[in-house]
Image: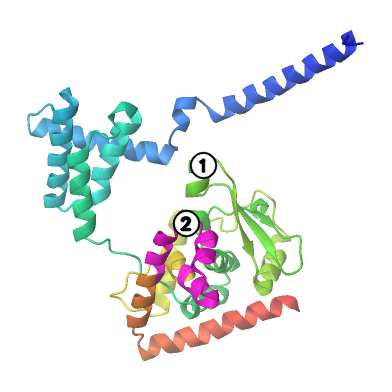
Amino acid sequence: MGVTSPRTSSSRGSRVRLVKQDRLLTRKQLGNLRGLIVNAATEERYYWALVRFFAFEESHGEHFTQDVYTLDAGVADYVCFLWENGDPRHWGEDTISSMCKRVPSLKGCFPSAWQLITAWQRHELPVRATPISTSVLLAMCGLAIEWGDMSLMLTLAVSFHCILRTAESYNVRMADLQLTQADTAVLSLPLTKSGQRFNVKESVTITDPYLVAALVRFSRDKEPGDLLYAEGARSFRSSFGALVRALDLPRHARYMPYSIRRGAATADFRMHGLLSRTTVRGRWKHERTCRIYINEALLELGEIQFSQKSQSLIDFYSAKAQTWLANQFV
């Protein structure tokens, strides 16, 4: 009693070694732990933020980095310089964030600089992408069908239905789509903004049976590793611009790929009137952020005026898309 047999002890030791080997292999693939604090794209952005700041420091013959007190004052001066030079606000934000990531003890050491950033945010509202209505999105899908570009059409439809961010739209792989049920599907999103931050895999349910049927048909000759939109980010943005021009949408409006997410959130909220539900589906951290999206988009959608030509094109191609989707059940 209480004695462990040599065989049991040996097998347990083998399992422990196997688990350790798996961990070592996984960690080797992931790389250095310090390099996982921020992703590669953010790391590059932070690098150039520091390059710009050090160039500013050198051009003014100053050494702001000699201690934390002069550093805060120097970054504050740099933020003012960016404002006066017409540069984007995120350059200043990236500079502070980059310093805090590299030297964590600097966190909380930039009160003056952050105060200026806050004033900037309050007085210069960002120029947002014009939200896209459901009818315009459908018209884009109809036009993509006429062009014979089913990949573009489905990417637009999935992006709008699932309230995707732009980068998420053209990174969807066939393996991310669980098309196992007749009228619903699940889209896994392994590379989302919040998913990377908290190391969780997010997902969105596709509840439109017509869209699910279209995706099932499209996936029949695809491999799991294939992208839903295989042409890449540049082509997606270029094709989106071509759709905007083809539909003769107002030139003064700022239609861009992010317009899909802004319009999709508004359409989703209008459908059921539950802010919390749209917040979860759009994967925002706070309802306040989602509310800002929706309130501003509602105002902008009400102000958009389409020409007679544009409205005719929207009506024609949106009807074409609806007919095509309905025929996917045939």
Residue at which label 1 appears: 198
When asked about the image quadrant of residue 108, the answer is top left
When asked about the image quadrant of residue 328, the answer is bottom right
Foreground residue among 327 and 270: 270
Mark 1 crowd level (few <14, some 14–19, many ≥20, 10 Å Cα)? few
Q: Amino acid at mark 1?
A: Phe
Residue at screen point 55% across, 30% down: 30
Disc 2 is placed on an element classified as loop
Q: Amino acid at mark 2?
A: Trp
Residue at screen point 32% across, 37% down: 46
Q: Hey, which residue is sitting farthest right in the picture?
A: 1
Foreground residue among 321 and 261: 261
Mark 2 crowd level (few <14, some 14–19, many ≥20, 10 Å Cα)? some
Indicate left or right for 174 with 281 as reference. Answer: right
Q: CA distance from mark 1 to mark 2?
A: 13 Å
Disc 1 is placed on an element classified as helix
Indicate whether 253 appears above or below 216: below
Q: Is residue 266 magenta?
A: yes
**Chief SS of the magenta region:** helix
Residue 303 at x, y percent in the picture = 32, 81
Indicate whether 234 appears above or below 300: above
Indicate left or right for 215 with 144 as reference. Answer: right
Residue at screen point 68% across, 20% down: 20
